[in-house]
Amino acid sequence: MKIVDDAVVRIEPPVRFGKNFQFNSSSSVGAFTYFYSGQAVKCASIGRYCSVAGGVRIGDHEHPTDWLSTSPFQYNPDRFGFSDAADDYVTLVEGVDEGDHDFRGKGPRIGNDVWIGARVTILVGANVGDGAVIASGAVVTKDVPPFAIVGGVPAKVIRYRFDDDTIAQLLDIAWWRFSPNQLADVSFDSPDIAIKEIQRRIDDGMTPYEPEVLEIRKPLPPEPEPTPPSPPAPAPLSRRRLVRRRLGKIRRSFTV
């Protein structure tokens, strides 16, 4: 996992990172979620038991489409600050960070038990409900309902994983609140039976899994090693030794 700049990622352990996954802004990740690879440019949160495949991008930066231009030169002077042509440039909204503009949108919120397929793109402002499945290569431009299977560009609902009554029960018991140990011997391949068993355990007093949250930041650069002291300068030669050294050079030149 890579964290950029001053972002802080709050993690409920355990979470697994298979390859490289980068967070560009602060976020939170629920327990029992795993990542393969990708980048969360802007993401408010990712729930528990999520499966994130390779090449996923979440919350890429937007550009204004109803301004004079779509170029960031209008609100981000740092883009071309290296050029003399931008020495005296003043942004349209001086003193306002580019992330505060309305066109940027809010970072997506990813629910629990969400399966995000390979090379999926989730745009800012698009939230994903619990239990949803996003097919590989889809571009999510708006909210995904709970337990919906979506795909395409832009992503559309293909079908729902369960009927409305089962979805309501799953959202009610919120089984992802519990650890795998607490869900041992549940009939996972039969949702109706599983729901009844989990509800029975809740009624018997089963309490949610609540681990200590870890806050992870970009590691500080290592402190530079101290510079070793310079060796002491040699003592200056006396006048007599200087004269002798010069005479020796003159004599050697005549004997060659």
Image (tube, rainbow, N blue to C red):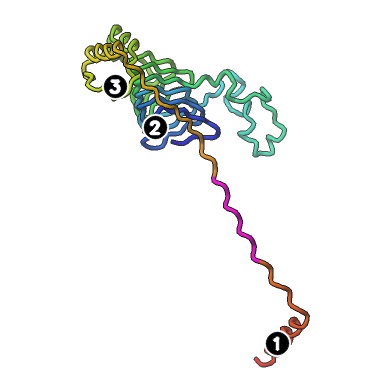
Q: Earlier in the sequence, mark 3 or mark 1?
A: 3
Q: Of 182 and 67, which appears nearest the observer?
A: 182
Amino acid type of disc 1?
Gly
Amino acid type of disc 3?
Gln
Q: Which residue is mark 2?
A: 55
Q: Measured along the vertical axis of the image, is residue 222 above or below residue 99?
A: below
Q: Which residue is mark 3?
A: 182
Q: Measured along the vertical axis of the image, is residue 22 above or below residue 168?
A: below
Q: Earlier in the sequence, mark 2 or mark 3?
A: 2
Q: Of 18 and 8, which appears nearest the observer?
A: 8
- Quadrant for residue 1, please give it: top left
- Quadrant for residue 63, please give it: top right
Q: In the image, is residue 215 part of the stretch drawn in magenta?
A: no
Asked if marks 3 and 1 touch (Cβ < 8 Å), the reply is no
Residue 186 appears left or right of 104 = left
Please tell me which residue is depicted at 44% across the width and 16% down the height of the picture: 142
Q: Position of residue 111 (x, y in %)?
A: 39, 19
Amino acid type of disc 2?
Gly
Q: Secondary structure at mark 3?
A: loop
Magenta stretch bounds:
222-231
* Foreground tag (3 vs 1): 3
Mark 3 neighbour density, 10 Å: few (under 14) some (14–19) many (20 or more): some
Q: Of 209 and 64, which appears nearest the observer?
A: 209
Q: Secondary structure at mark 2?
A: loop
Residue 98 appears left or right of 246 = left
